[in-house]
Amino acid sequence: MVLFFSCSVGLFYYFTSMHQRYLTRYSLQPPLMRLSLLLLLTVASALVVDPSAKYICSEEDSTDCYPQIFVPTEEWKTIKPGQEIPPGLHVRMNMDSLQKEAKLMSEDERESEETPKEIGFNGGESEHFEGHKVENQVPAVYETSDVSTFNGAVNAVLRFGDRITSSSSGKLNEKDINDAAETLVDLSHDLEHGVRLTQDPKIFISILDIADSGWFGSQGETFADHGVVVAQQSRGHW
């Protein structure tokens, strides 16, 4: 990091000297001089590293360093190991690379969050949103068994919670419910999914019932931790 900062300072002085030679050679007028200096400062500022920023460096490659806090753009970017994700971003799981990605919300997406809209659930059933306020409770039935999706993960948690409290039968196993919890942790970063999670208390009640039931033994505490993470991340979208 020190070496990189030193190189940045060296490049700044190099560009400054080149800028002075350029002005002397071509005798630019004051407005053009100011413009060229402004461009120079813009380039130089991009080379200087903020010393107060925290970075994470790969254990395998010490030269592979990146900010601890994820820096979003308008394009999807991979979230690297250990990076903290600011609230209000769109987060997704890239099914090709199996890596989490995030980006800034577009202007249209921000405007749509500020105006009433309808979001369809369960094959056409709709809920009315006004900002982040939901007039009707999010439906508790999510018709899919794919726990890698949001609806499937919620369905698995609710079904397993009902199985515990009512002693009903079911085919869900420990791996299914753990995978469902991991999916909810990942997707709770996303604005839309975070809002939907916070509007259905049955999800969190089911998570707590599962954790307290003893079904997973010592793993119950780990599953409860999943619920805490989901709640904390979803709360950032209130």
Image (cartoon, rainbow, N blue to C red):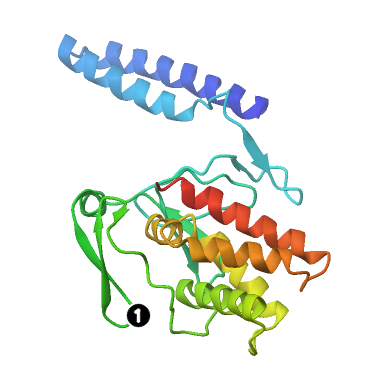
Q: Residue 135 placed where, x, y %?
A: 27, 59
Q: Residue 37 placed where, x, y %?
A: 30, 17
Mark 1: which amino acid? Asn
Please tell me which residue lies in front, 105 or 13: 105
- Residue shown at the point (39%, 54%) measured from the top left: 191
| Badge 1 density bin: few <14, some 14–19, many ≥20, Cα 10 Å | few
Note whether 105 is above or below 128 in the view shown.
above
Note whether 138 is above or below 17 in the view shown.
below
Is residue 95 visible to the viewer in this orientation of the structure? no
| Quadrant into which the N terminus falls | top right
**Circle 1 residue:** 122
The secondary element bearing badge 1 is classed as loop
**Displayed quadrant of residue 224:** bottom right
- Residue shown at the point (62%, 53%) measured from the top left: 228
Please tell me which residue lies in front, 129 or 233: 129
Is residue 177 visible to the viewer in this orientation of the structure? yes
Is 34 on the left or on the right of 222, as rendered?
A: left
Is 160 on the left or on the right of 145, as rendered?
A: right
- Residue shown at the point (51%, 46%) measured from the top left: 85
